[in-house]
Amino acid sequence: MALYQKGIVAEANRSALFLTLNQTRNEGAKQRVKQVLANVTAIEEKYNQLEPEAELCLVAAIGSSYWSQIIDAEVPAELTAFPSFENGENVAPNTPVDLLFHIRSERKDLNFQLARELCSELGDAVQVVEEVDGFRYFDMRDFTGFVDGTENPQGDDRIGVAVVGDEDPAFTGGSYIHLQRYIHNMDFWNKQPVKKQEETYGRTKEDNVEFASTDKALTAHTKRTSLKDSDGNAIEILRHSMPYGDTQACGLLFASYCRTPKNFTLMLKSMVEGDGKGHTDHLLKYTRAVTGQAFFAPSRSFLENINK
């Protein structure tokens, strides 16, 4: 298997920076972007040699609508636009961008420095769309007070879930990424009794014990996102989400990595549109997605040879 970008499956860090950008029309912009993408692995290795204890990861990904503009070869087999849905007040918008640099480590200062270096190297070839700082909140909890990422695959299963294999030989070692920025309505959430909050998630708040399937409401978040295929196998994604915010507003930067975009699409549809019987994800009463982007993160060797 082509060597995947290590940040695709690496364990969670304390701090993350999600940097999304669009290419400009300035002279030489496309070539400048390709030069920086080709150098991503070397940049990551440089920081890890300087500060190995920081466990820094840098994932570079190319937007679904930008891929054919910058890559002259074939397209990953399942690369499509972000799957937007709308059902009354439940929305999942499609807000495409060209590039994603997902930086994470145990040190916010290194994330910041690396982002500065990338932007300096890219110069006027890009414009920053969003720069979102994520951070570990207590024992890996969302601002709602519930542990986030409980359903993530562990160990070698992370590779099987998140990394493209022989099903698409030209893009083995890559990963499909979906990114959403959610803004929480914390005032409304905090007015709800703990029992209702737990029913909304489908698990306990303090000790993170999931309810038995028969005890979950059909509108519980874990009910709407715990899906199985026709053979009874769990439909999985690898989440690299992070809380973000300040004293005025906060939310979750949701990041899904998977070897196929279909799994995320099925989960999002189940949340927003529900089961066809009116049972949508009631967590969406308290949070709202304001962005939605689809990317492909190629293998390290693909990036290193992007100019050839």
Image: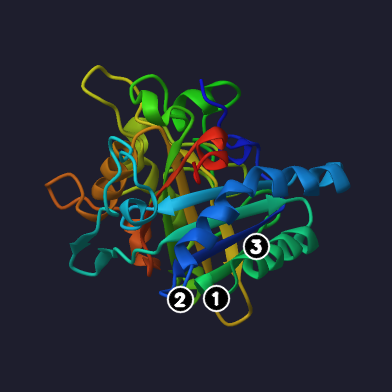
In the structure shown, which secondary structural element does the residue marked by tag 3 occupy?
Answer: helix
Within 10 Å of disc 2 (Cα), the crowding (few <14, some 14-19, many 20+) is few
Against 33, is 27 above or below?
below
Is residue 39 left or right of 21 when viewed as pictured? right
- Give the quarter of the image for residue 224: top left
Q: Which residue is mark 2?
A: 26
Along the line of sight, the residue nearer the viewer: 56 or 2? 2
Mark sitting earlier along the chain (3/1): 3
**Mark 2 → mark 1, Cα distance in angstroms:** 7 Å
Q: Residue at x 58, y 37 (%)?
A: 5
- Give the quarter of the image for residue 283: bottom left
Mark 3 touches mark 2? (CB < 8 Å): no
Q: Given the image, on which type of amino acid does mark 2 rest?
A: Asn
Instruction: Please identify the residue farthest to the bottom as the structure is shown.
Output: 248
* Colour treatment of the image: rainbow
In the structure shown, which secondary structural element does the residue marked by tag 1 occupy?
Answer: helix
Q: Nearer the viewer, mark 3 or mark 1?
A: 1
Residue 206 x, y percent position in the rendering? 61, 48
Q: Which residue is mark 3?
A: 118
Q: Which residue is mark 1?
A: 124
Along the line of sight, the residue nearer the viewer: 201 or 166? 166
Mark 2 touches mark 1? (CB < 8 Å): yes
Q: Residue at x 57, y 21 (%)?
A: 156
**Mark 3 → mark 1, Cα distance in angstroms:** 12 Å
Within 10 Å of disc 1 (Cα), the crowding (few <14, some 14-19, many 20+) is some
Mark sitting earlier along the chain (3/2): 2
Q: Given the image, on which type of amino acid does mark 1 rest?
A: Asp
Q: Residue at x 63, y 76 (%)?
A: 246
Q: Is residue 146 visible?
A: no
